[in-house]
Image: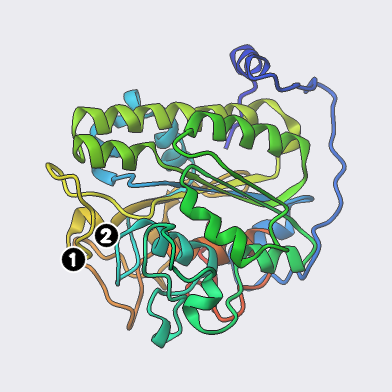
Amino acid sequence: MVFVRSITSVALLAALGIAVPAVAGSAVVAAQPSGPVSPVGSDSRVVAANRPDPQVLAISIDALMPRAVRRLGRDRAPNLWRLIDEGASTLEARTQVELTVTLPNHTSMVTGRRIKATKGGHGVTWNDDAPGRPPTVQAAAGHDVASLFSTAHAAGRSTALFATKSKFSLFQRSWPDDLDRVTIKEEKDAVVVRKVVRDLLKRDRGVTFVHLGAADKAGHTKGFMSRGYLRAVRRLDGLLGTILEATDTDSRLDDLTIILTADHGGVPGTRDHGDAGARDDYRVPFAVWGPGISPADLYDLNPGYRDPGKSRPGLKGKQPVRNGDVANLALGLLGLDPVPGSRFGVKRSLLVTAAD
């Protein structure tokens, strides 16, 4: 992958108030990552072993529909398509089986668990921060639940959470000692992205998790695949471009890998995404982009995973790529072992580079 450092990119970062160091002749000397680096086969830890200071930025674009990504195309969603074209990706990833709503699916992303507590899941089945809800993920599950944040933090890596919905305070309550920064700005996606870029450039984060909610809001108010929804996706594409500009122009992000997915989709012509059996609800994108990542279809790279086509596989047998793969893929890219008690990507995290 070629990282282009352009005058336009520098100007954009300067407008955001972010200092951009000179690239020519510069070098970054970074410490080796903390925690175990144990490459297994060709999984994501091989990529980590070849990088001096691996960092991961996991981005969830709430309600991002593969149908919308295709409709907008490369001309109107160039940054989403850049991740797809230059990274390991699929537009046929799947949500959690039990529910296609925001908070349960994001909890699976950060724990690597399914939803149903009696089957080893995290137990978060609600989708708001109303009084009377269990105060933590641990309370919902009835036992201790580790996360991407706690696992990375235990290995000495710094962590951060940025979100645009107040209900994500659940994560701060659940892992208060394992999140070094939490920023929640209700419905302020542009503000959050600016803060993410500044934080990435100022701090040596191991993992940063970002939630952006504008597409979901537009889907609920204007309808999924409506003009209003597609406009929101285009705006989010522009914000994603701000992050990519930073990776192009600043050597401090040379070892940054981006994981992008979604919590659910939405049924076109409706304002709903609550039908876990509806294809447009359970189908989501999944892309991994950064240095050392092969431009490829994730299913071509991962014969151990099942390309679901139009189907909705259950949790038995060969699995599709799921949004719940985020946690252990992110840890693998840091050279770390999986989240204790997790389910997705435990034996081997997703392959993100072609075998030599």
Amino acid marked by disc 2: Tyr
Point out the residue furthest to the front here: 131
Q: Residue at x 44, y 62 (%)?
A: 131
Tell me the number on the disc at residue 277.
Answer: 1
**Image check: 298 left or right of 314?**
right
Q: Residue at x 32, y 83 (%)?
A: 316
Q: Residue at x 45, y 26 (%)?
A: 238
**Image check: 58 left or right of 214?**
right
- Mark 1: few/some/many CA within 10 Å (<14, 14-19, 20+): some
Q: Residue at x 23, y 34 (%)?
A: 71
Quadrant that contains the N terminus: top right
Res 126 → quadrant: bottom left
- Mark 2: few/some/many CA within 10 Å (<14, 14-19, 20+): many
Res 322 → quadrant: bottom left
Tell me the number on the disc at residue 313.
Answer: none
Name the residue carrying label 2: 282
Q: Residue 166 at what x, y percent from top left?
A: 49, 48
Point out the residue furthest to the left here: 269
Dot 2 falls on a residue whose secondary structure is helix
Amino acid marked by disc 1: Gly
Q: Is residue 34 visible?
A: yes
Q: Residue 239 at what x, y percent from top left?
A: 49, 29
Quadrant that contains the C terminus: bottom right
Mark count: 2
